[in-house]
Image: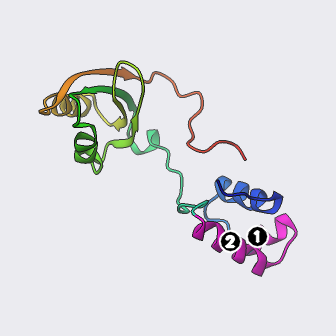
Amino acid sequence: MKSIDDLDQKILRMLLKDASVNYETIANEVGTSLGTVHNRIKRMKEEKIIARIIPELDAKNLGFDICALIDVRIKGGHLEELQKKFLNYDNVCSIYDITGEYDTTFVAKFKTTEDLNKFVKELAGQKYVLRTSTKLVLNVIKEGFVPKI
């Protein structure tokens, strides 16, 4: 585990709020020099604390109104094979190994139920898939992938 101090946390909070914020604005806001901000961000990138700096898109405003959580039970020994096959599908946002009745879960977003139906049928039709269970998200209360720092 990497450690970060208060200044790192302040910098990260600003980047999480707005990935396009410039270093000068960050420096002024957190009360340090431009060089310090540059060096801190560079170090956090090197240490993989910051994996990448990207904009956060609103899927609904892009027409992806359907969010599905798709659990998949896979015949033993073929989990990674199936997951790798779906890594680059445009609709797949996340793939997780999970515990319980199923082995993996996909978080995917779709524009139409027809797109969702086609995807689930393709997934369920894979050679080692034993069963799937699809849940639709009705309302997003909170969505994020990083705990508050």
4 w.r.t. 82: above or below = below
Which residue sits at x=68%, y=71%? 22
| Tag 1 residue | 25
Looking at the image, residue 91 sits to the left or right of residue 65; the answer is left
Q: Identify which residue is drawn at 45% across, 38% down.
A: 60
Front one among 41 and 141: 41
- The amino acid beneath tag 2 is Asn
Looking at the magenta stretch, what is its main secondary structure? Answer: helix
Tag shown at residue 97: none
Q: How did the renderer colour the structure?
A: rainbow
Q: Secondary structure at mark 1?
A: helix
Whether label 2 touches label 1, CB < 8 Å: yes
Residue 133 image-quadrant placement: top left
Q: Is residue 59 above or below residue 116?
A: below
Is residue 60 part of the magenta span, yes or no? Answer: no
Which quadrant of the view contains residue 75?
A: top left
Q: Amino acid at mark 1?
A: Thr
Question: Does the magenta portion include 27?
Answer: yes
The crowd level at tag 2 (other Cα within 10 Å; few <14, some 14-19, many 20+) is few
**Residue positioned 51% across, 24% down in the render:** 139
> What is the x, y in percent for residue 128?
16, 31
| Residue placed furthest toward the bottom | 35
Element marked by disc 2:
loop
> What is the crowding at mark 1: few (fewer than 14 residues within 10 Å), some, or many (at least 20)?
few
Instruction: Write down the region rendered in magenta.
Output: 24-47
Q: Residue at x 33, y 28 (%)?
A: 103
Image-quadrant location for residue 70: top left
| Nearer to me, 17 or 49 | 49
- Residue at mark 2: 22
Q: Position of residue 96 (x, y in %)?
A: 40, 37
Q: Residue furthest front?
A: 77
Q: Residue furthest right?
A: 31
